[in-house]
Amino acid sequence: MSRILNYGMVGGGPGAFIGHAHRHSVALDESAKLVAGCFSRDHEKCLRQGEELHLSPDRCYTSYLEMAQKEAAREDGIDFVTVVTPNSSHYEICKAFLEAGIHVACDKPVTVSFAQAQELRDLAREKGLLFMVTYTYTGHVTAKYVGDLVRSGGIGDVRMVMAEYPQGWLAFPENDGGWRSDPAFSGPVNCLGDLGTHVENIIATMTGLKIRRVLAKMDKKVEGHILDDNDSILVEYDTGASGIYWVSQIAVGSDNSLKVRIYGSRGTVLWEQESPEKVTVIDADKTVREIHRGHACVTKHAAGYTRLPAGHPEGWYEAMANLYHSFTACVNAKKDGTFTDDMIDFPTIEDGAHGLAFVEACLKSTENGNTWIPVEA
Amino acid sequence: MSRILNYGMVGGGPGAFIGHAHRHSVALDESAKLVAGCFSRDHEKCLRQGEELHLSPDRCYTSYLEMAQKEAAREDGIDFVTVVTPNSSHYEICKAFLEAGIHVACDKPVTVSFAQAQELRDLAREKGLLFMVTYTYTGHVTAKYVGDLVRSGGIGDVRMVMAEYPQGWLAFPENDGGWRSDPAFSGPVNCLGDLGTHVENIIATMTGLKIRRVLAKMDKKVEGHILDDNDSILVEYDTGASGIYWVSQIAVGSDNSLKVRIYGSRGTVLWEQESPEKVTVIDADKTVREIHRGHACVTKHAAGYTRLPAGHPEGWYEAMANLYHSFTACVNAKKDGTFTDDMIDFPTIEDGAHGLAFVEACLKSTENGNTWIPVEA
Amino acid sequence: MSRILNYGMVGGGPGAFIGHAHRHSVALDESAKLVAGCFSRDHEKCLRQGEELHLSPDRCYTSYLEMAQKEAAREDGIDFVTVVTPNSSHYEICKAFLEAGIHVACDKPVTVSFAQAQELRDLAREKGLLFMVTYTYTGHVTAKYVGDLVRSGGIGDVRMVMAEYPQGWLAFPENDGGWRSDPAFSGPVNCLGDLGTHVENIIATMTGLKIRRVLAKMDKKVEGHILDDNDSILVEYDTGASGIYWVSQIAVGSDNSLKVRIYGSRGTVLWEQESPEKVTVIDADKTVREIHRGHACVTKHAAGYTRLPAGHPEGWYEAMANLYHSFTACVNAKKDGTFTDDMIDFPTIEDGAHGLAFVEACLKSTENGNTWIPVEA
Amino acid sequence: MSRILNYGMVGGGPGAFIGHAHRHSVALDESAKLVAGCFSRDHEKCLRQGEELHLSPDRCYTSYLEMAQKEAAREDGIDFVTVVTPNSSHYEICKAFLEAGIHVACDKPVTVSFAQAQELRDLAREKGLLFMVTYTYTGHVTAKYVGDLVRSGGIGDVRMVMAEYPQGWLAFPENDGGWRSDPAFSGPVNCLGDLGTHVENIIATMTGLKIRRVLAKMDKKVEGHILDDNDSILVEYDTGASGIYWVSQIAVGSDNSLKVRIYGSRGTVLWEQESPEKVTVIDADKTVREIHRGHACVTKHAAGYTRLPAGHPEGWYEAMANLYHSFTACVNAKKDGTFTDDMIDFPTIEDGAHGLAFVEACLKSTENGNTWIPVEA
């Protein structure tokens, strides 16, 4: 039977958007209750955030290590932790909770190096723990439908993928980009880590294709940027299919314009994150079909995540909630001993590690003057 | 200081969409906790729903009267009740809770007659209780922005309003429409009550215009329909402005296509419920501007309800949650003694009563052979 | 065999948009050559326009009567005349050419009264002459496709029609509207004649429905307007189907936004004049299909008018040219003695007369305080 | 003074789309009259086409050389020739007419090698003859507006260009692609020549940027294709700006989806060939403005080509006609001795030569395993 789980959060202090967003998404299903947190290294801030969230002060920690150990020791300790700190700290925090035997949900990119991600992946496997990487966009009902359609051969063999994620917020020198533009917190990449990994993940999830090699040109378009802000990437998949990925933070006017176009031998599918209520499918006879989230033609698997009738828009929270929906069901199944691998319908540490392998290949390609670099499996 | 309120629900038993939807919307803000319910007249169903929602069995009632009285008597009784039953029972249920001194949030249309709505309005005023009618769509950030723009003269004097809400679910005789098509539960109208009141309310909210008179033609297009399923309404506002409202349940392929177009002497504004992330404003010089929920050009009042950055879609839950956001803040203020009328930023029983006055005028117009009928204030 | 016809033009002097437009449309097919004209009552202007169009000066007339008689008398006289003068002069000009035995193409509305239109209709019948009224929009390939689809039952029985044609050019008092706003040239209506007849005609053409009665509210929204500038019309067809027509000249930002939505018992079809390259069809199972002008799914009849491959946009000229395509083929067939009625695929004087009957019923309804008025057959 | 010019056509025999299209476009302005043609090497076909076009049989030639010489010798010989044969024959035909002293309009790509294009360029310069290469899309009013906006700094410095032209007609092995897929007629490239040169040209025209180097991956996705059918190209401009060009013939469902997105330091502009009536401009403050062809905000230069009011769609013919509008004005000015270089507002042989330099650099890059190759000036 499904119980309300207890969970903790590391990061997400006062004013942090992403912590707030995770909490709201979990709240949609009421499947887990926030009971512990390490919201800030500053004890006062941590307590203030905890109070606002109605937490007991003794479960507001200023050290994630202390939190991992004390929560692991409690009878009513957290069932899982959500990690929403800047990228460079993910590795050590996730490692601490895995070592304490606690399931982990971590924001993406999961680490700042492929080696770190591999280590976490191996540790999670060894401990038998669940590890979700919250690539939110894959949670949309329509994204799941695209995956079902493409992976079942609905558009024939994939020949060409056009995928992009432009943003515009770093187009102007007066915006310094905060921690994301600072290698100390963000690691060796900015745009590619923040946006490129989303593109890599959603295409992998939707198509099942493995990237064989990449050829990347990573630009710094705005004066003062130390890290990349505009990346053009040619992709070759193991089937021989081709892809172009473009991610940018300097595309004035773009918000979160993740767009996916997958061209197969028998059809085409188009999906846009900012309009997640619909998918466009074009058949071989050129019929353009617009398929809505709530309509009967969506696959049963994808439709299972629908919360509202067609025409009453769902959005980003529901996509994130859908990830937690599967994750918390799996955590519950772990507790009950009923867990099986095929229950997993969320991005895992394996996916997170692929993202880092992709990032490192792109970096190397750029350093080599834009040559083809294999992506490690 | 803001506390987590306790609330109860009447209706919303197993499988009921609307109860589920209200609970999810409240959960988004974590401003209120469901602690009591009268989910069904069938005790077993009521208990089952209560258990699923982690309620104490002694607060699962099968009589709303008993619930109103017992909860009013408890120290930790509910601060407000949410009523999500079929239309014809709203009146008696709301009345019971108002008489017990409990604030009310009720689904729309608030009653099945103008007289009932007036009675509830007067009772709420007399008792000093808050009464929200959940016209969800007015909660969208963009809908609030349209209201701010139009009511402040941003498009000049309103001259013409085109508003419509077509659905298609009753287009086929094999769908009998459930309780909505049954006068015993739905009252004297189906389409006009379910959809027409939404149109009436959102235009009133956005423009501030009062309807002087209506000329309505209410159709029954599908064989077997006892109540209206397609309504065409000419509207004259007290300023002399004109309007056309069209609502339908037989528009094949339409889901919840509430669309509003307001034409002023200096500009035009377009808004669609199914694409609530944006508003289109056309200036006198024909510049077409697309304004997104999360952008800086939105008014401060509307932007205050934004939860996610532009490009990460918000949807129907957030719109409903925005109503509860203001409502629960007002309930808290009532408890603290800090409440003032200008804090109300949600549809009230006054708005609900206007909806019923509109419905009754349309009915009379149709009975008279489509003549102009004044709408009571 | 098809020959190049000779044609003349009345109206269309220097700077007149509509004369230019007719000439360009005819030129697309090279099926007729302009050889005579009465472009202006001012002889100098007439000659200037004739010279620019490479006409012989002796075929530049300043009297349409002289033109009709002299051209009728010539061996190489015009095969047809195109009349593009202000509305109030159509009647006498068309009559003169019909009496001279010359086929007529006339701009819409064909006359300013139903009686005049009936007289022209009867005269054309009696003389065995062709009379085209250039309701341009029906010439679009996609408009023809919609007609083929709807009239063959492709969306089941039509239940509801939503049709509108808003413009914005008269929204501001500083634009006096020229001759269209002057009863002396425009007749008793402005907006209804200029836009309303387009709506009436395209719906009649697409659906084959006859209007049984109308209920109209004709507004004058802008100070200084003597004629209507915003009209709301309830329509009842002889099958019992319902319709709402809205036409306006005060909808700020609208150019020529003729939009048609036809809801049937088994499907829905959407068409917009400003996006004539596509039609949207929604099936009973809610599949939304976007059908492009050049695609295989368009009917053979409609596809026969396609000039460019899909994706290379056709526009307004092609729509007008399509009318002339059928009209000149019919004129040629008349000359060859091979003409049959089923060759007609353009709007005729019968359609033009229906338009006037519709206009007069709407006027009467408005005068009566917005009551139902039958439309004469 | 402007006279009606005489022109001839090489290619464009019975059933050939492109010849038909050029003739229609010229006809729109009535600025030139077709008087001679070499429509086919087959004399009977040539005569048949000539008869259909009302040409004198003695000006229907089966040898372009004979046509060039005889027309050059006539008092009333053609003022210019339009060449619409398969790519590989352009060079020799254009050369013959240039040598005969006749102005040339030729379809694109102008030749199958950069060397040929240079030779034609030099010959035209030497002879003082006009040479238009009909990159149709640059003729759209909105395309001209984009150029005016971008080249005048309206979006700041261009940083990133995303341009693509997918088609789908060669996605299926059963379509052999005709002459375009045959190196003997098409030269060494198919997709890149047919579509890639359009992308190269429109970006050069709109931005004024010169390409410094390209990195191309040219694919053959469909079994049986000898030439490229899907090309991914990274572009570096001489300013340091970046670009991605994608062209494809295997994108199921795409017709002629040429799309341009230009991202500058202060704004963004979006343009699509299939929706040529509008341009989207996004300002630094994120205001999204939709600008229509016929509106006042379009530059005077671009607006000068508008033929129809806003809301009455123009299309592909008008774009082509706009090229001929400037070209025939220049030919007339050459005859009058009033020609100056700044009168040229159409793509020239210089632009055509750039296209071939681009093609050859892409070919070399692909042969080299996708390395950067400079593009010759």
Image (cartoon, coloured by chain):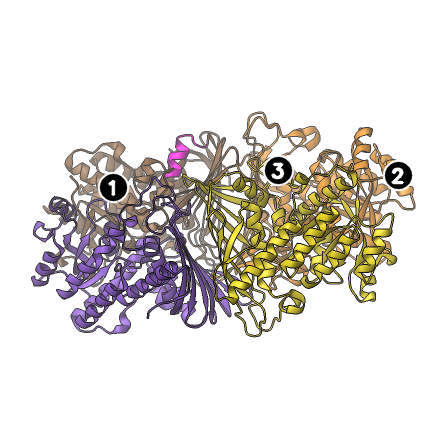
Chain colours: A purple, B brown, C orange, D yellow
Which secondary structure, mark 1?
helix
Q: Chain of mark 2?
A: C
Structural crowding at the residue carrying mark 2, measured as other residues with C-alpha within 10 Å and reported as few (<14), some (14–19) or many (≥20): some
Q: Chain of mark 1?
A: B
- Magenta region: B145-155
Structural crowding at the residue carrying mark 3, measured as other residues with C-alpha within 10 Å and reported as few (<14), some (14–19) or many (≥20): few
Return the mark for residue D79. none
Decide if residue C246 is in sight here. Answer: no
**D108 to the left or right of A41:** right
Which amino acid, mark 1? Phe
Which residue is depicted at the point 81% across and 29% down? C44
What main secondary structure does the magenta stretch of the protein show?
helix
Q: Are marks 3 and 2 in contact (CB under 8 Å)?
A: no
Which secondary structure, mark 2?
helix
Observer-side mark, 1 or 3, equals: 3
Which secondary structure, mark 3?
helix
Q: Position of residue D72 (x, y in %)?
A: 83, 51
Q: Position of residue C135 (x, y in %)?
A: 68, 46
Residue A91, image quadrant: bottom left
Q: Position of residue D332 (x, y in %)?
A: 76, 41
Which amino acid, mark 2? Gln
Read off the residue under disc 1. Answer: B327
Q: Chain of mark 3?
A: D
Work out how far the residue at label 1 is from the one at label 3, CA to CA, in angstroms: 56 Å
Residue B143, image quadrant: top left
Which amino acid, mark 3? His
* Foreground of the two, A33 or B98: A33
Read off the residue under disc 3. Answer: D301
Question: Is D181 drawn above or below residue D329 in the view shown?
Answer: below
Read off the residue under disc 2. Answer: C69
Q: Is residue B150 magenta?
A: yes
Which residue is depicted at the point 56% across and 40% down? D148
